[in-house]
Image (cartoon, helix red, strand yellow):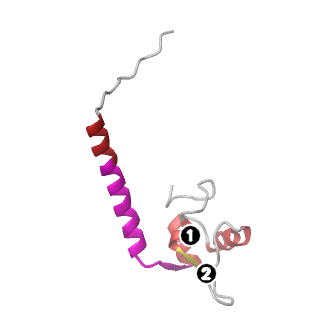
Amino acid sequence: MKKEQKPMYVIDGEDLDSLLRDIVKSEFAVLEEKLRTPPRILTREEAGQKIGVSKNTISEYIKRGLIPNRGIGHKILVLESDLERIPSKYNRNYYN
């Protein structure tokens, strides 16, 4: 059984340098946008809708330490950015 060979690409140093600079510039632009955007605070219901689970599941995730509770007193609040940190095996539809 013969393996199918994949094409080989040759790139010179200048092209590689330019390509890497473009990639880094693009990634920094994304990061800068995230840093400039104020955090969005969600209720349990909103957080559950974002990732396709119930508000009780959000409470369970908080109990397990998958996401922190950002609320005060008995009010449970979650940062939208914290939802991105939930491992994909728990996540239903939003950040996969």
Residue closest to the eye, 91 or 83: 83
| Number of numbered discs overlaid on the protein picture | 2
**Marks 2 and 1 in Cβ contact (< 8 Å):** yes
Residue 21 x %, y %:
32, 50
Magenta stretch mostly in which secondary structure? helix
- Is 35 situated left or right of 81 in this image? left
Q: Quadrant of residue 55?
A: bottom right
Identity of the residue drawn at 53% across and 63% down: 84
Magenta span contains residue 33: yes
SS assignment at label 1: helix
Residue 57 x %, y %:
66, 69
Q: Earlier in the sequence, mark 2 or mark 1?
A: 2
Identity of the residue drawn at 40% across and 75% down: 37
Identity of the residue drawn at 53% across and 79% down: 42
Magenta residues span: 21-43
Gap in angstroms between the C-alphas marked 2 and 1: 10 Å
What amino acid type should be assigned to the residue bearing mark 2? Arg
Position above or below: 70 against 62: below
SS assignment at label 2: loop
Residue marked by disc 2: 70
What amino acid type should be assigned to the residue bearing mark 1? Asp
Residue lying at the far front in this picture: please name it: 13
Residue marked by disc 1: 82
